[in-house]
Image (cartoon, grey):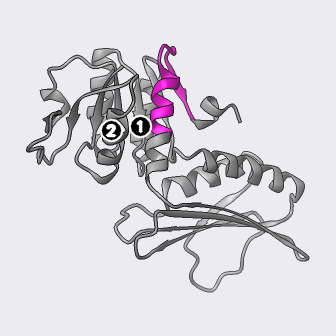
Amino acid sequence: MKVLLSGYNGYMGQVLAKMIKQDSELELVCGVDKNLNCEGDLVKCYSTFKEVSMDVDIVVDFSHHSLTKELIDFGIKNNIPLIIATTGQTEEEKNIIIEASKKIPVFYAANYSIGIAVLIKEAKNIVKAFPNADIEIVETHHNRKIDAPSGTALKIADGLKEVRNDANFVFGRNGNKKREKNDIGISAIRLGNVVGIHEVLISTEHECISIKHEAYDRGLFAEGAINAIKFIKGKSAKLYSMNDMLDV
């Protein structure tokens, strides 16, 4: 498969590019990045999707959510699948992605870690077993991360809301207000060079269960994206997620 990598010159873009080049089933044919610092690189780089003149079979996006419309327009125009690994989309941008999936295959995940998919599944089972428990989500990332809370924390919260239908999300508690029964608290910590830690705490008056996932290396997200590329090959138009790929 011929791959176009959006966000090619970013940290994750470079990690993924290296893995793609080592995979015999994939060919990295070009990249899109506003930073055209590609001297000495054998891969052709473009600053925008409108400039792309090469044939590609799929686009993997590790850029910025502000490029969502440009990315979607390119995918629909060329009738090719999209792997979206960028987080922080606005509601409008999420709707653009959903509408696009009616025309082309779109794999969209806030986190490409298999471990996170398993965490969400198990956390939902625990919440089912403790319907009156308090729920808090705490996420920690490096000090360069822009969006807060993380897309993964929001994905976890959305998963738990499927079980706790009347839940209300409370972001970064402050002030003088007691916790409401159906709150799901979501807190963000930014420090150092932490790749990513997500913890769900589920507590009753008598006990607390904590389930945590910690990423040691960003390569796991690139690995997940490669699995998604191979999964979506030949698929029909639909919005796909980690649950579809892992059948969890």
In 3D space, how far apart are the residues under numbered discs 1 and 2 (Cα atoms)?
9 Å
* Residue drawn at point x = 57 percent, y = 57 percent: 153
Q: Are marks 1 and 2 in contact (CB under 8 Å)?
A: yes
Range of magenta residues? 224-241
Q: What residue type is labelled 1?
A: Ile
Residue 31 - label:
none
Residue 84 - label:
1
* Element assignment for label 2: helix
Inspect the magenta stretch and tell me whether residue 238 lies in it: yes
Location of residue 158 with respect to 229 vertically, above or below: below
Residue 125, percent from left and from top: 82, 50
Q: Which amino acid does label 2 sit on?
A: Thr
Closer to the camera in the image, 15 or 111: 15
* Residue drawn at point x = 60 percent, y = 30 percent: 245
Residue 63 visible, this angle? no
Q: Name the residue under label 2.
A: 68
Location of residue 240 with respect to 233 vertically, above or below: below
